[in-house]
Amino acid sequence: MFKPLTSFFELTGAYFLLLKKTLTKPQNWKIFWENYFRELDDIGLKTVGLISFISFFIGGVVVIQTALNLENPLIDPSLIGFAAKQSVILEFSPTLSSVILAGIVGSYIASTIGTMRITEQIDALDVMGINSANYLILPKILAAVTFYPFLIALSMFLGVFGGWVAGIVTDLVSTQDYLEGIRIGFEPFHFTYSMIKTIIFAFLIASIPSFFGYRVRGGALEVGRASTKAVIWTSVMIVFWNYIITQLLLS
């Protein structure tokens, strides 16, 4: 009856113990920065295309759906731009993009570290006196935390831009009304709120899959299972922390 709960607390404790081992001063700064820039490319730059594509079309879908539900002539058409701006900045870009990144980047990180574990590369690092957790995981965390805010800011811009393109192409909203809607009720703190969420989500996206990959024992089958668990748990924690942060900062 209490086994699932016990397992959860065991995993949580092991996760924080690994973080303690990870978040220490690198033993060799030159190697650390080399790993950091490599991770910046692997888990950052290579995701720009997909996130940009998805953001552009999500913004378009938001505008079309909003416009089709505001057919009443008494409703100000500028509300279409307002709804697109609020939806993209507050939720779609920071949260949906992070869940997508959890699937792409999370599975990559878990499988990469898990493969190193089963091929005894991590054991070799430990034998040589290298802090393997710090060497492998910290560059990934720092790369995600420093790059993803810029990625989400790009996603916001493309989402709003995609909404404008969709409105013009479908003739559902004019440029003047759309721009007026974007300016209505603009709250700078909403952008700050989204960036705070993004940084926390980026930390989760890098650290949770690293934890599951680092703990792999067995063979290739276990690596696959670890990747699946990593994606599931990262997505769950993103949704959970999204609720907590929203309650704390916007309620």
Image (spheres, grey):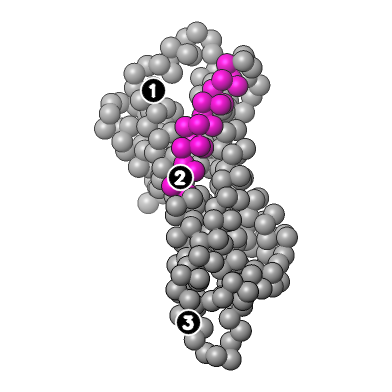
Say if the magenta span includes residue 41. yes
Q: x, y (%) of residue 220?
A: 28, 29
Residue 40 in sight from this viewpoint:
yes
Task: Give the amino acid at mark 2.
Answer: Gly
Residue at left offset 60%, top offset 61%: 90
- Would you say 184 lies left or right of 135 here? right
Residue range in magenta is 31-51
- Identify which residue, 244 or 80, lies in the foreground: 80
The count of marks equals 3
Q: CA distance from mark 2 to mark 1?
A: 30 Å
Residue 63 in sight from this viewpoint:
no
Residue at left offset 50%, top offset 8%: 128
Q: Nearer the viewer, mark 2 or mark 1?
A: 2
Q: CA distance from mark 3 to mark 1?
A: 53 Å
Q: x, y (%) of residue 74?
A: 58, 91
Is tag 2's residue or tag 1's residue first in the polypeptide sequence?
2
Q: Residues within 10 Å of mark 2 (few under 14, many from 20)?
A: few
Q: Which residue is mark 3?
A: 69
Relative to 181, does residue 21 appear above or below in the rendering? above
- Identify which residue, 35 or 218, lies in the foreground: 35
- Would you say 216 lies left or right of 198 here? left
Task: Give the amino acid at mark 3.
Answer: Asn
Q: x, y (%) of residue 185?
A: 71, 71
Q: Which mark is residue 117?
A: 1
Callout 2: helix, strand or loop? helix
Q: Nearer the viewer, mark 3 or mark 1?
A: 3
